[in-house]
Image (cartoon, grey):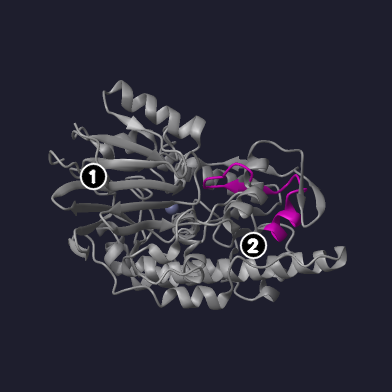
Amino acid sequence: MAAGKSAIRYVCYGAAKEVTGSCHLLECGGRRVLIDCGLFQGGREQDRENAKPFGFEPASIDVLLLTHAHLDHCGRIPKLVKEGFRGRILATAATRDLARIVMLDAASLQEEDARRAQRRSRRRGDLNGEPLYTLDDALHAMDFFSEPVAYDSEITILDGVRATFRDAGHILGSASILLKLDSGGCTCKVLFSGDLGNPGRPILRDPERAPAADYVVMETTYGDRPHRALPDSVDELYHAIKQTIDRGGNVIIPTFALERAQEILYYLHRGIQNGVLPAHTPVFMDSPMAISATDIFRRHPECFDEAFHQELRRGDPFAMSNLHFCRDTADSMAINHIQSGAIILAGSGMCTGGRVLHHLKHNLWRERCSIVFVGYAAEGSLARRIVDGAATVRIYGEDVRVKAQVWTINGFSAHADQPALLDWLGREKRQQVLLVHGEYERGMCAMEACLKQAGVSCRIPGRGEPIALATATAREPC
Ligand code: ZN
């Protein structure tokens, strides 16, 4: 076959051999489509990555397709716009609404961090500490969102590029995206899994199975293991709460504001209704973003599964008489005076910032309390250090001993586990499966071994490594 110029090309610019920072570029002829533009998360090293150039020219991107509103998928959009992107952003209606609050929250945290860094650097005599982007940048980014995209309807996004958003069952509005590309008669179907949900969870529908595609770019967050069954995890959550309250402590649940917070609320509501949890237990949702996200949930019933629609007809499944929403800082600080008997849901889920840090500072050193992790803890995050058994952790410049009981309940994960990923992919023949969004030595390598054993061609792309998906040649069509 004659060597020709690459007509359809894929490059991974984030979530290559890592979990966070999702950012994928597809080139089809002269057109450039970006899939997700997420923040690298975990610690200082990831913060530095976020500040670096993207590796491509933002102004050269025609369209950005957003799979869902998690920060590691949408968190660099304001930076993309700030640095010259002027194309359209396409997403489902729920993703657009959630991405707005996620990006605004990220901007205000970055402004806050920058102010703190500036105070420190002024004292040191230098002038560093610019935020990655400001609230104005985040608001400006919202202007680039087009009309929302509906699930399962094919749309032409550019000449020779058609896209179909399919329910990924991961968080409200989440999608896998199938792209049909045509460059001068050279065609190719590429499926981006986005983040895939775990089938059988409440509220949302299960992920739609992967359709026919030549290439599948697939997440591998839990590519190495099965989750604990959900009913066992719910029982464990109730057990952790009851035990902690009986011995006179507080329960801190570091919570991702989207989906997990609503799911945990749903289970607390059910536990109290069924008498499994004491009726008088005060529950604090100490996260302005989770409160806003809960409101957005109520506005998007088109994303709910049938069982949840039925529950809604019987009443609000998020409502509890003992539930306190804490938007103001003063309400949040008042919780610090509660010594026992409270369930506190606060972000961020990985304890990389947010109000949960204050609650950890007040409760982590107390043996009677419990910290219940119900989500993913990335390498380098405070959550991961606590889960991994650190005896002492540093919070706001203070060493805090880890004396509270630490629970890790992984059955609540919003991510498909290994069997669910394989089931989603199915046995359809593919040219190649490209593995992204996972810890290299865990999820990714395990999934690679699994697929190879099943005779599926797969590959783990490196960051910035171009991969030709279809090649136009002078002599023969591809
Ligand atoms: Zn996600």
Residue 346 left/right relative to 218: right
First along the sequence among labels 2 and 1: 1
Q: Which residue is mark 2?
A: 354
Magenta-span inclusion, residue 377: yes
Between 66 and 359, the residue placed more toward the observer is: 66
Residue 338 left/right relative to 214: right
Residue 27 left/right relative to 120: left
Between 328 and 180, the residue placed more toward the observer is: 180
- Residue 63's disc number: none
Magenta-span inclusion, residue 18: no
Please tell me how crowded label 2 is: few (under 14), some (14-19), or many (20+) other residues with Cα within 10 Å. some
x and y percent of residue 250 in the render?
A: 68, 54
Quarter of the image with the N terminus in it: top left
Image point (59%, 49%), residue name: 241
Quarter of the image with the C terminus in it: top left
Between 396 and 440, the residue placed more toward the observer is: 440
Q: CA distance from mark 2 to mark 1?
A: 36 Å
Image point (16%, 53%), residue name: 184
Check mark 2 vs ligand 1: CB closer than 8 Å? yes or no.
no
Between 208 and 201, the residue placed more toward the observer is: 208
- Residue 209's disc number: 1
Residue 466 shows in this picture = yes
Helix, strand or loop at label 2? It is loop
Which quadrant of the view contains residue 143? bottom left
Magenta residues span 357-380
Residue 168 shows in this picture = no
x and y percent of residue 473 in the render?
A: 19, 41
What's the amino acid at mark 1? Answer: Arg
Check mark 1 vs ligand 1: CB closer than 8 Å? yes or no.
no
x and y percent of residue 18 in the render?
A: 50, 41
